[in-house]
Amino acid sequence: MHKAEAWSGIGEIMRPGHFSDRENVDGARDSKRHMRQLGAAIFLVGLGALIIPATGCERATPTASPKSVVIAVSGDTAGWLTPCGCASNQAGGLPRRGTYLAGLRGGGGGADVLYLDAGGAAGGVSGYHRDKFEAILSGERAMGVAAHNLGKSELALGADALRDLVTRTGTPLVSANARGADGKPIAPAAREVEAGGRTFLVVGVVSPRYAANGITVSDPRAGVLDALAKFPASAKGRVVVVLAYLPEDELAALAAGLPEVDAVVGGPTGQAVAPRRVGPVLLAAATNKGKFLVRLDAPAGGAAWTGEVVEMGPKLADAADQTGNVRAFLDRLVQRDYSAKDTGVVEPPPPGTPAGFKVAGSAACAACHPADTAVWKQSKHAHAFDTIHGKGYQADASCQSCHTTGFAMPGGFDRMSIGTAKVHVGCESCHGPSAAHAASPAAARTPWRAADQCARCHDHENSPAFNYDTYWPKIAHDKGTGSGGR
């Protein structure tokens, strides 16, 4: 029997390794449990698997001949339905995730593919964010997700909304330690699944620090143990996987305190955690807007496992069905016509913004600044809204916030149905809301220093190649004015 190869610590990314069926675990298991480990030791849930409700008595029946299983776990999607497309090398998105999973399932070798999500898929609680969350769950269901754990952003939506989701969509949510204000579970504690000739029990937990909206969260370890007591092993080779939406320190502690389980896969951990051993338990995490998936290959017959963290990068094509799912979401946004201030993506104004500020519009600037306006009209800023409109994202608040002027500000861009007078990156996107200055130039200056505002939209996510010294000359139009980039 091969000994488990050493894995890197928490925070190391994409470092594959091998794992054996765990023998010689010092005092961690009783003999019955030890023998069960020799027959199987993997985790998770996916396409083609039989899901048994946590409240039922029916159980999955393993097939006679175990076969290999490929396990993929996403997590912490955080509303990242798809990359916005502002940069060519952006990672993540359900269309790429769909392609990756389809490749696993069509790769031959006879392996079953199990797909799970560790939680944290929602990006907020506004109507806009709820629509996006449902689109993410719709995409996951199309990819054959077998269990979706409740994370911080899911709890923020409230127990009633989550229960309604299960009723309306059949999304296989799990949570062993989250309860509504009525004291009742929000979702099944665990789901039992058959795949590759073995039985998998998938349990979901979330950190108590994420309790919100009247939801109570008990100790994760106690929740897992309670779920195990309700699902006594009934089939040789059953495997227990815990999906745990816990911060890094709590995640490692949970794995160390649960020798009864086979794997703990979670987030949010800042960056993805490559699979490693914590005693007899395998620990890993998928995080950071769903840009990385944890993949584990568990061959049949006791061969060594391999595992890695895989980036959902631009080399992966977009799956057609997931692209259609994104398009349906964008069409729904056009119908919803959300007001900017109600989208939940509004940021507070930068320091120095005066009380009672209001956006005047670029036309108000042109009368006194014709030369500067001429430079602006030749820039990409003057056509910024055309970029997202051409891609169908004109109603998406996450794009509008950087491709319009004064998004959600008084006098600024509000919604498509009101008109498009405040589209594009206009003067006040950089100089600040300037109605007071336009009314009395001598009495009130523009409130922001333009050069300080670039990084609000040209951040690492959307503009990774941004360099001030290279970009500023492309838009500079204050030469000879002494305004110093104001």
Image: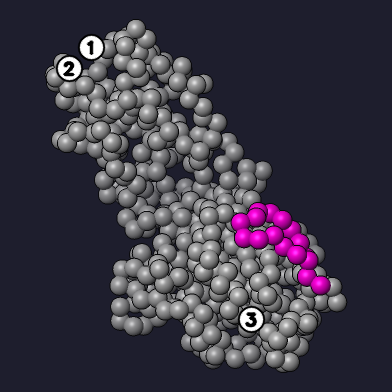
Disc 3 element: loop
Q: What colour scheme has been applied to the protein in the rendered image?
A: one colour
Mark 1 Cα shell of 10 Å, populated few (<14), some (14-19), many (≥20):
few
Side of 382 where 42 appears, left or right: right
Q: Is residue 218 visible?
A: yes
User: The magenta stretch spans which residues?
Assistant: 3-18
Residue ID at (31%, 44%):
346
Q: Residue at x 68, y 54 (%)?
A: 14
Q: Residue drawn at (25%, 33%), measured in percent from left and top?
A: 352
Looking at the rendered image, the disc whose residue lies closer to the viewer, 3 or 1, is 3
Residue 460 higher or lower than 184, as above or below: above
**Is 376 displayed left or right of 118 in the figure?**
left
Q: Secondary structure at mark 1?
A: loop
Q: Does the CB distance between marks 2 and 1 fall below 8 Å?
A: yes
Give the camera-side residue of 50 and 276: 276
> In the rendered image of this protein, does residue 282 appear above or below residue 376?
below
- In the rendered image, which residue does mark 3 sit on? 259
Where is residue 311 shown, x and y percent of the image?
64, 50
Q: Main secondary structure of the magenta part?
A: loop
Q: Is residue 45 visible?
A: no
